[in-house]
Amino acid sequence: MIYGAFFRDILEYPFVDAGNDWLIFALPPAELAVHPADEAGAHELF
């Protein structure tokens, strides 16, 4: 969870853990979701 950890730990954006490594971050005025991808070690940003 490299990207999620960056937004969570470094930028300290507030987030909700939706389960299964799906983190949803509150970004003004939008949201950012980090989801695990089908490939090992990869993530998708929405």
Image (cartoon, rainbow, N blue to C red):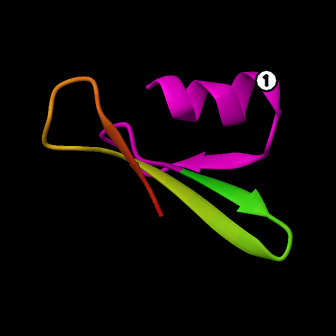
Position of residue 28 measured from the top left corner of the image (x, y, whole percent): 86, 69
- Stretch of the chain drawn in magenta: 1-23
User: Which residue is rendered at x = 48% and y = 64% of the image?
Assistant: 46
- Which residue does the image show at 59% across and 25% down from the upper left? 5
In the rendered image, the quadrant that contains the N terminus is: top left
Q: Position of residue 4 (x, y in %)?
A: 55, 34
Q: Is residue 17 magenta?
A: yes
Q: Using residue 44 as the reference point, say whether residue 17 is left or right of it.
A: right
Binning the other alpha carbons within 10 Å of mark 1 as few (below 14), some (14 to 19) or many (20 upward) gives: few
What residue is at 29 percent from the left and 33 percent from the top? 42
Q: Label 1: state its secondary structure.
A: helix
In this view, the residue in front, 24 or 7, is: 7
Type of amino acid under label 1 = Ile
The residue that appears at 83% across and 77% down in the rendered structure is: 29
Q: In the figure, is residue 44 to the left or right of 24?
A: left
- Left or right for 27, reference 35: right
2 sits left or right of 5 in the view: left
Q: Is residue 44 above or below residue 30?
A: above
Most distant residue in the bottom direction: 29
Residue under numbered circle 1? 10
Q: Does the segment drawn in magenta span residue 5? A: yes
14 or 40, which lies in front? 40
Above-or-below relation of 29 to 26 = below
